[in-house]
Amino acid sequence: MKRISRLELLNTGTELLFGSVLNTHLSYLGQQLFSLGLRIQRQTTVPDGYAIRDAILEAASRSDALLITGGLGPTSDDVTRDIVAELTNRPLEYVEPIFEKIRARFDRRGLRMSERISRQAYVPRGATVLDNDFGTAPGLYVPATEQLPYMFLLPGPPRELRPMFEAKVVPLLRGLTAETDLQAIVYRTSGLGESYLEEMVGKDLEALPGIEVGYCARVGEVDLRLIGGAKTLAEADRLAREKLGDYIVTTEAKELEEVVVQRLTECRASLATAESCTGGHLADRLTNVPGASAVLLEGHVTYSNAAKESTLSVPRHLLETVGAVSEEVAAAMAEGVRTRANADFGLSTTGIAGPGGGTEAKPVGTVFIGLAEKGGKTRVEKHFFPSDRPTFKQMVSQYALNLLRRRL
Amino acid sequence: MKRISRLELLNTGTELLFGSVLNTHLSYLGQQLFSLGLRIQRQTTVPDGYAIRDAILEAASRSDALLITGGLGPTSDDVTRDIVAELTNRPLEYVEPIFEKIRARFDRRGLRMSERISRQAYVPRGATVLDNDFGTAPGLYVPATEQLPYMFLLPGPPRELRPMFEAKVVPLLRGLTAETDLQAIVYRTSGLGESYLEEMVGKDLEALPGIEVGYCARVGEVDLRLIGGAKTLAEADRLAREKLGDYIVTTEAKELEEVVVQRLTECRASLATAESCTGGHLADRLTNVPGASAVLLEGHVTYSNAAKESTLSVPRHLLETVGAVSEEVAAAMAEGVRTRANADFGLSTTGIAGPGGGTEAKPVGTVFIGLAEKGGKTRVEKHFFPSDRPTFKQMVSQYALNLLRRRL
């Protein structure tokens, strides 16, 4: 049996190249395969039609296995099934139970079935049918030959592909995967730029034999990725943790807001937010996490001075003297919202998102972040993030969440 | 001069194949290129390193132009610049003004610059530098040769790539693209499902000769796309507007929240928001629009009943009798926040985002949206959007914004 070590992903669909649908398959499958010790070596998107044939033949020379998404539906541009049947010399055969399953699905929903649906009941001879519990098109697994890789044909819609992949494809792949002793750790860090991070750890880590080091920067965070054998990786891990310390947010596949909600829950601590320049983005991120309602008591978006006074009890004299974008007002907002909600922590943001509103003393990008705590001292951080509005809001919310995380 | 008709996209970055970052380039660039009359014929993702070289050579045989993203940064895995220099026989030359621009950027932010940054100041001889106004790595445009396509090297982070593409690459592509007399109109609609939309307009539009009709569904909105010659397109446009009427949000490349902020500004009307289940997402979307601070007076995230009472003056007896997720509470929240802020409109959301909290009478996905207005009647809409949390929040905020838009 040919063992899989080189794997590629082929996404088919004109709508993907048109930009009308975001392709989330690569991100999802990349993470799933990684946990099996597999990496996608290349991903390709081609339009519906015979470009699929060329792409399969090209991938065949580079890979042991090929995941193909899309083109299994009932309409005339769904040709993946036919192309694979032709390439593998496996004639298409009508499989009655597939048709019955599809018909039952339509009946349950009280829908009329169109003529074309029966196309989906044809299977290349000898292929394994992967049941689709969330749609009509079944997936297919076609064994490898001398010339062609293992092929897994999966439906395009993520809500159909994902459960099928986890229930049907993962067990098949497990049986076909070469043993590897390589492991990986991904450190999500916040508060450091990419080049700083590399300066802090790059030389030492790259000096370890057999360790692959990678970096990935996003807004307000950088991932450090280490891959290697168990023993060297343990050494690299010690080194990374020693050098990076508290900059490490997590080594799990978690967002910063998930880590914050989890820590708050563990500490049985509650939070209230007072946002000016982030305009609700901080609360929005927190409430994306299931269970956030148990720790986030309330949040307020107080753009105007009037709202800062009436909702957060920020003293008017402060707003009139030092101005809304100031250390003092950030502190008063954090304390005001904490007191108002009787929460353990109060977190505030006030700054100039732009494009308008900047001055020489306080240019666009200036921001103050406040953190008040019950029975503790209020901290305020000043930052400068000149950028577009959404990036500014993301940066500020990132630093605010990280300020709170480091305190927990 | 070689004119561009066949175009490919090459995304580089191990992190993309790893699944740690979602690749949004294809979707963004697909839409942008469409308005230039260009389509992406194939998209490929390869890891950092010399796989980039192979992919460029393969694309060369199929395409006139190649957009390459990523690998322009300061770290050792950023090798796109070097590979293109080698392939095109253009030695890398140090360009002082690029270095100075990067240094000025660091100085403005009060940051120390790492040694490695200077890599970004090297340019293949004869390439055109595309300034990066949102990051350090400049883009590059390398003219075509007999063997190689036009190449556009763009930075990986979307916040850097997008403004660079629109300001620098679009004008270059315009000059290199074959003339076409086809025009396009994209109608952004909200409040209709894709199949309903197709039922309303599909047959009539497809009956017009020479009109290409396309649909694209996203969360809570559907785009209708018409392409054709000027005269037939005008006829199709009349038909589409007549049939779809108020469902059309805009035919410009604008988000629903931009349209809402613009209309509020034009009407000199003000808004306050009271969010339970959307958790700040509604305010976040509104405050992404420059100028939102002039119309959004305040916003509140009131998860708990206590916060609904104290901040929005929702009567306790309502919360105790009909419950927080109800028509009555949605109305009271909208009226409470409108009165509190003395705004022209008050917009509220209350529902069950899940995964927990559903009951038989009010299952996960149930939501009420309230709209109160000064001197007018309060409206409440009930909807049912069973899905994951982020999709639920997006759907609810979409319907809330659309409810307000149709009133303006």
Image (cartoon, coloured by chain):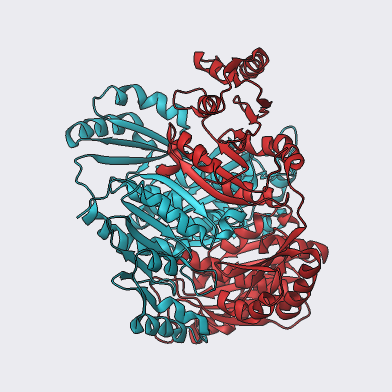
Chain colours: A red, B cyan
* Residue B94 position in % (x across, y down): 37, 81
Pick whichever, B230 or B384, lies toward us: B230
Residue at image coords 39%, 86%? A360
- Check the image and name the residue furthest to the front: A146
Pick whichever, B180 or B66, lies toward us: B66
User: Looking at the image, is A206 positioned above or below residue A181?
Assistant: below
The image quarter in which residue B154 lies: bottom left
The N terminus of chain B - image quarter: bottom left
Pick whichever, A206 or B88, lies toward us: B88
Residue at image coords 40%, 78%? B121
Report if residue A21 is visible in the image.
no
Residue at image coords 63%, 26%? A138
Pick whichever, B379 or A33, lies toward us: A33
User: Looking at the image, is B220 positioned above or below residue A274?
Assistant: above
* Residue B361 position in % (x across, y down): 72, 32
Left or right, B194 with respect to A95, comes to: left
Residue at image coords 40%, 75%? A357
* Residue A100 position in % (x across, y down): 66, 14
* Residue A58 position in % (x across, y down): 49, 42
